[in-house]
Amino acid sequence: MLANACQANGLAGLVTDTGVRDTAELRKLGFPVFSYSVSIKGTVKETVGPLAEPIQIGGELVRPGDVIRGDADGLVVVRREDLAYAIEQARKREEAEAADIAEDSTAGQAVESSALMR
């Protein structure tokens, strides 16, 4: 229900430091949810959390306007004032990695030259 409501209100995903359930249905929806745990127990919907206020989640302070970016490997919080710098650094990293991959002519060389093999 919560994922459907989030999607209906234009949210791109959900981050919670509580448990979620119905993960198969969440996957079918294609709605990304990052949670502390998965639990079969029902949820408590009696309290409404703060809106447009800083919150602490997963040990990280998240303020209104901060950007949260997530993928299968996890999440990162980027402060609003650091966003342009973070984007610039991410692009530089992607370009450097692409250049390294292009330089290596075989997959074996790519693996051997990476830190994974050291």
Image (cartoon, rainbow, N blue to C red):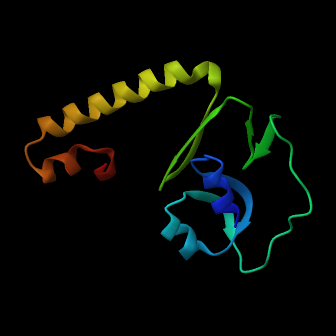
Residue drawn at x 80%, y 34% is: 52
For this rendering, which residue is in front, 36 or 64?
64
Residue 3, how many percent across, how many down?
Answer: 64, 61
Residue drawn at x 32%, y 33% is: 94
Quick one: which residue is furthest to the bottom in this view? 40
Residue drawn at x 63%, y 53% is: 8
For this rendering, which residue is in front, 94 or 50?
50
Residue 35 appears in the picture as rendered: no
Judge from the rendering whether residue 79 lies leftward or rightward of residue 30; answer left or right.
Answer: right
Quarter-wise, where is residue 38 in the image? bottom right
Q: Is residue 84 above or below residue 9?
A: above
Quick one: which residue is furthest to the front in this view? 8
Q: Is residue 2 above or below residue 106?
A: below
Judge from the rendering whether residue 25 lies leftward or rightward of residue 91; answer left or right.
Answer: right
Judge from the rendering whether residue 34 lies leftward or rightward of residue 29; answer left or right.
Answer: right
Residue drawn at x 64%, y 62% is: 4
Q: Quadrant of the N terminus?
A: bottom right
Quarter-wise, where is residue 100 in the image? top left
Residue 41, how many percent across, how many down?
Answer: 78, 79
Q: How many marks?
A: 0
Residue 48, how many percent across, how many down?
Answer: 88, 52
Residue 89, how many percent across, how many down?
Answer: 43, 24
Residue 97 appears in the picture as rendered: yes
Quick one: which residue is furthest to the right in this view? 46
